[in-house]
Image (tube, rainbow, N blue to C red):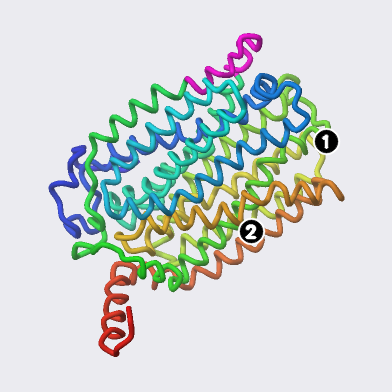
Amino acid sequence: MATVSSDHSDSGRDCKAGTFRGRTLPGARTALTLLLLINLLNYIDRQVLAAVEPEVQQSLLPADPNAGAKMGLLWTAFLVTYMWSSPVFGLLAERYSRWVLIGVAVALWSLASGGSGLATTFSALLLTRCLVGIGEAAYAPVAPTIIADLYPLARRGQVLAWFYMAIPVGSALGYALGGQMATIDRAAESWRWAFYAVVLPGLLLALWSLRMRDPPRGATDLAAPPRRARPRDLLVLLRTPSYVLDSLGMTAMTFAIGAVGFWMPRYLASQQVAPVFGAIAPPTFLGLLTAVAGLVATLAGGMVGDWLRPRLPGSYFLVSGAGLLISVPCVWLFLVVPFPLAWLFVFLAEFFLFFNTGPTNTILANVTHPSMRATAFALNILVIHTLGDAISPPVVGAIADRTSLAHGFVVVSMFLLIGGLVWLWGARYLQRDTEAAPHRLDAVAAEASQTSKAGWPT
């Protein structure tokens, strides 16, 4: 992980933008450790519900003929509140303390998770999952901007990879925690303790966050203090090819991952896959594979992207695009190769799907002005989920109703192919957009000034 000279949590108070240009800020390791722990808890909390869903349904909707649809609505409610609240908190993060927002967010979703365990009706559970979505929306677009302000361009890929490796590891831990808690005593509704378990760690991490101080925006990559972004500056994102192409590729990937993640257990059941080593159930083994593939691939992708950056200007796009294209034949092969050999191609498909996590998020950070990074991440979250995993499970389900899940997964692979090609296309713009990022808002201000002098409204 990153090496820093010291670990002062108030380093942001004592340095100015540009002071550490090209170097890591003091206190970076402490901040990264805290953000990584929070992100682990984030994904543990997000996946706990999926692990205890059968027990929750039996407790709250025991005889409801629409129980399946209602349980699915819990995920939809979380996702909708999460993706549509993100831009609001992105804008707030440009004006107020980011660590305060994070502390409040972690406390909110931790208490909301505890409320999920206390819920005695489906309506109450639905409300608490909406609150979890709002809490996570206040955290997700803000955390990577702090990391970007602590670490220079040359190191952001691998550092953001450490942060995002919490996605597969935290998700796997969430499944494991929920599964273990739910089976302790079904008659006593022990599934509720899976939600209670995240409350105390979350509140402690929230208190720790409130003790932290923001690093100055652009401290490692700007020579002058950044100015506050204005609403019209959002147009800068649409004029930045690397940002647009990165978001389009991430949308295609999110579409695919959302569908595969939702339907893969059903596919394994339809194939009557035998327990692995005679004892490990296929869904459990799938979780283990996902955790290992995601952890190794996320870290490797960030390191390879940083290593190639001085040699290939578009390295982050090239690494991401190549990984996504390699995943396509892996998806096809696990559909035609019989199990247990098919597990190898499941692992490889997941490995190359996660390989882009660090590089693609590094692109978002590098090509956006520090004054609007939180807004840029928030807008990205809104787009990739609205057009991605919010719609892909029902689309693939509809295909499966008419043909088979295998055909649905083939359609998913086409999105991976499109996403990979889009990312390769983006490589030609990356160096130019990265170099221009610190000056983009100045250019917009100059353009607006010229327009105003010409007599047009700004």
Q: Which residue is mark 2?
A: 325
The image shows residue 198 at horizontal and vertical percentages of 45, 24
Mark 2: secondary structure: helix
Residue 182 is a magenta residue: yes
For image coordinates 22% across by 52% down, the residue present is 216
In this view, the residue in front, 232 or 185, is: 232
Q: Amino acid at mark 1?
A: Gln
| Residue 173 position (above or below residue 247) | above
Type of secondary structure dominating the magenta stretch: helix
Residue 373 is a magenta residue: no
The image shows residue 245 at horizontal and vertical percentages of 52, 66
| Residue 370 position (above or below residue 45) | below
Query: How busy is the neighbourhood of tag 2: few (under 14 within 10 Å), some, or many (20 plus)?
Result: many
For image coordinates 69% across by 55% down, the residue present is 328
In the image, the segment drawn in magenta is 180-196
Q: Which residue is mark 1?
A: 271
